[in-house]
Amino acid sequence: MRKVRLHIFISGIVQGVGFRYSLRRVAISNGVKGWVRNLRDGRVEAVLEGDEDSVRRVLAWCRKGPSLARVDKVEAFEEQYRGEFKGFEIRWW
């Protein structure tokens, strides 16, 4: 299975609705590693690494988010896979 890395930015009502914690749970359950954080401009930023199918499943979840979120836009950029993460963490600013 091909390994991929996506750098994503999620816009909409995505802060204060449990997005980061839910994304972490979804990523871990799919075997995806990386990190997620809030940005000062109201977006959520994340880096996802893992098997291509697993990363695509997490990306698909990001297009909906948790029940209280309203996702308006998801930008995803493929980057060189590095395999640098041991798990999935929530970062602060």
Image (cartoon, rainbow, N blue to C red):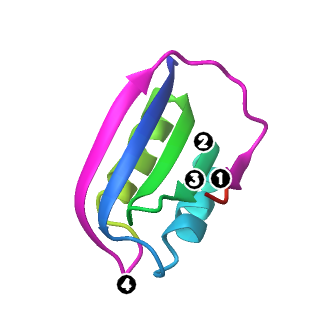
Check if mark 2's residue and mark 1's residue have beta carbons within 8 Å.
yes
Q: Position of residue 8 (x, y in %)?
A: 40, 42
* Residue 2 part of the magenta-drawn span: no
Q: Position of residue 85 (x, y in %)?
A: 73, 33
Q: Nearest to the eye among marks 4 and 3: give it.
A: 3
Give the residue at mark 4. Answer: 68
Left or right: where 71 falls relative to 5: left
| Cα–Cα span, label 3 and label 2 | 12 Å
Res. 93 image quadrant: bottom right
Q: Is residue 2 left or right of residue 65?
A: right
Q: Secondary structure at mark 2?
A: loop
SS at mark 4 in the image = loop
Q: Which contiguous range is marked in magenta? A: 66-90
Discs 4, 2 touching: Cβ within 8 Å: no
Q: Amino acid at mark 1?
A: Ile
> Would you call the spot at circle 3 few (<14 residues within 10 Å), some (14-19), or many (20 or more)?
many
Q: Is residue 71 above or below residue 75?
A: below
Which amino acid type corresponds to the residue marked 2 in the rendered image? Val
At label 1, counting other C-alpha atoms closer than 10 Å, the crowd grade (few under 14, some 14-19, many 20 or more) is some
In percent of the image, x 37 and y 84: which residue is there?
68
Amino acid type shown at disc 4 = Leu
Q: Are marks 1 and 4 in contact (CB under 8 Å)?
A: no
Up/down of 12 relative to 26, above or below: below
